[in-house]
Image: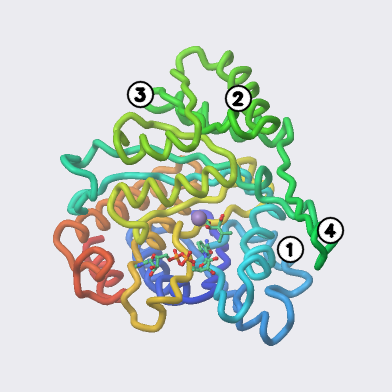
């Protein structure tokens, strides 16, 4: 039995409330499937740490974390204490970039028991992946302000698209589409308005598509793609997008499938040179923090994705992943549910019920 060393980084806000439920379910799964998970709590990468130290993380954060097998992350950000660009560029975005987690894999699935805000949709109708580029693109710190305070005040924010960065995310997405029954890939573009980066993205998609003759490939501008997510989500299978477009699509998709409170994500370094990071799609939700009503399912499902990735196809890990998913489905059908899903249960009620269902 191999040991997995996991750094637990709860972060801010409801990250701290959903994390204990994620750990509770992982501990139960480890017990049942005989997995050896060793958790180490990290008490930095949060805004209170910033207020005390003037930084979100210690200077040697990379050295401290690089030897872990995975990072299990809650959420960061508390805009009333620290501006968001400081807290997020000081924590989560450093992890993604420093550990070269260039794939952000975000499943979008209409789950049993979850009322769909779109009419006449049933389980199975919405079941796709957003594959988001996670280390470059529109998220960049290149640029700056000029002529500040004058009438010529000018702000420049560059986007960066490298051949290596674009090709590796496209390859991951095509490989995923190739393994799925529908073998269908959709690329998000905006080559009508963004005249340099997006035509390049399209060109690389076409080049990659030539190596995957079995994959049906289409592309949509991001504006109409958003409309199609709402009007006909059943048409999607694997959706590949740049960093910003992927961010937007991965909140829109889960909203179309009921709630962002259950949406998971895996920030992957597929080569396993560095730890990958598993976190819910949602943020720190200051508006509900402190009431023990946050939905822990996004955190718990992300834990299942972590086991799957750590196991690399090993049967016990795969079984643990599947069992957590079945337990989540059971609780979504029978309850208890948190208020975002129309229930009155607490965060811990849901965590405990998922452990019971396991
Ligand atoms: P958010 O996801 O935190 O919240 C958006 C809305 O969804 C809020 O009304 C919130 O109450 C609700 N919500 C979110 N998660 C929920 C859950 N598990 N259960 C029930 N309701 C839930 O997004 P925001 O308000 O834009 O951001 C708040 C802070 O979180 C900001 O600092 C932002 O930068 C940060 N953020 C961090 C991450 C991350 O760490 N990965 C992701 C998104 C936002
Ligand atoms: C996400 C979040 C982050 C992102 C923010 C908090 C920087 O919205 O993980 O989706 O934009 O990537
Ligand atoms: Mn987001």
Image region (quadrant) for ligand 1: bottom left
Q: Residue at x 66, y 43 (%)?
A: 137
79 vs 184, nearest the viewer = 79
Task: Indicate the secondary structure of the residue bearing disc 3.
Answer: loop
Q: Earlier in the sequence, mark 2 or mark 1?
A: 1
Q: Residue at x 33, y 29 (%)?
A: 235
| Residue placed under numbered mark 2 in the picture | 202
Task: Indicate the secondary structure of the residue bearing disc 2.
Answer: helix
Q: Earlier in the sequence, mark 4 or mark 3?
A: 4
What separation in Å lies between label 2 and label 4 (alpha carbons)? 32 Å
- Please identify, in this view, whether the residue under mark 2 or under mark 4 is nearer the observer: 4
Q: Residue at x 46, y 18 (%)?
A: 215
Q: Confirm if mark 4 falls within 8 A of ligand 2.
A: no
Q: Position of residue 214 (x, y in %)?
A: 45, 14
292 vs 305, nearest the viewer = 292
Q: Residue at x 46, y 26 (%)?
A: 185
Q: Confirm if mark 2 falls within 8 A of ligand 2.
A: no
Can you tell which quarter of the image residue 120 is in?
Answer: top left
| Residue placed under numbered mark 4 in the picture | 146
Above or below residue 24? Residue 313 is: above
- Please identify, in this view, whether the residue under mark 2 or under mark 1 is nearer the observer: 2
Can you tell which quarter of the image residue 26 is in?
Answer: bottom left
Can you tell which quarter of the image residue 343 is in?
Answer: bottom left
| Residue placed under numbered mark 3 in the picture | 182
Q: Are marks 4 and 1 in contact (CB under 8 Å)?
A: no
Q: Position of residue 342 (x, y in %)?
A: 20, 66
Dot 1 surroundings within 10 Å: few (below 14), some, or many (20 or more)? some
What separation in Å lies between label 1 and label 3 (alpha carbons)? 40 Å
Q: Are marks 4 and 3 in contact (CB under 8 Å)?
A: no
Mark sitting on residue 62 = 1
Q: Position of residue 298 (x, y in %)?
A: 38, 59
């Amino acid at each position: 039995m191999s040991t997995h060393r996991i750094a637990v980084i709860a972060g801010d806000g409801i990250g701290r409330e959903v994390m204990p439920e994620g750990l509770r379910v992982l501990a139960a799964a480890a017990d049942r499937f005989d997995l050896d998970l060793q958790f180490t709590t990290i008490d930095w990468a949060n805004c209170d740490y910033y207020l005390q130290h003037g930084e979100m993380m210690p200077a040697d954060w990379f050295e401290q974390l690089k030897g872990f097998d995975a990072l299990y992350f809650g959420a960061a950000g508390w805009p009333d204490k620290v501006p968001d660009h400081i807290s997020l560029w000081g924590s989560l975005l450093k992890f993604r970039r420093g550990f070269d987690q260039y794939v952000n894999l975000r499943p979008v699935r209409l789950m049993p028991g979850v009322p769909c805000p779109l009419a006449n949709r049933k389980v199975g109708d919405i079941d796709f992946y957003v594959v988001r580029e996670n280390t470059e693109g529109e998220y960049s710190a290149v640029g700056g302000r000029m002529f500040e305070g004058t009438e010529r005040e000018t702000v420049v924010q560059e986007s960066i698209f490298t051949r290596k960065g674009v090709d590796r995310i496209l390859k991951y997405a095509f490989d995923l589409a190739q393994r799925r029954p529908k073998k269908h890939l959709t690329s998000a573009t905006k080559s009508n308005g963004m005249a340099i980066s997006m035509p390049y993205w399209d060109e690389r998609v076409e080049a990659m598509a030539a190596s995957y003759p079995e994959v049906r490939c289409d592309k949509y501008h991001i504006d109409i793609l958003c409309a199609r997510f709402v009007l006909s989500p059943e048409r999607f299978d694997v959706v590949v997008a740049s960093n910003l477009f992927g961010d937007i699509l991965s909140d829109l998709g889960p909203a179309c499938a009921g709630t962002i409170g259950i949406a998971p994500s895996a920030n992957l370094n597929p080569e396993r040179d560095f730890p990958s990071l598993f976190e819910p799609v949602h943020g720190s939700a200051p508006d509900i923090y402190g009431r023990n009503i946050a939905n822990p399912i996004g955190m718990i499902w992300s834990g299942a994705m972590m086991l799957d990735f750590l196991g690399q196809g090993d049967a016990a890990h795969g079984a643990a992943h599947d069992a957590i998913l079945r337990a989540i489905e059971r609780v979504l059908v029978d309850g208890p549910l948190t208020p975002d899903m129309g229930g009155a249960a607490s965060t811990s009620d849901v965590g405990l019920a998922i452990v019971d269902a396991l």
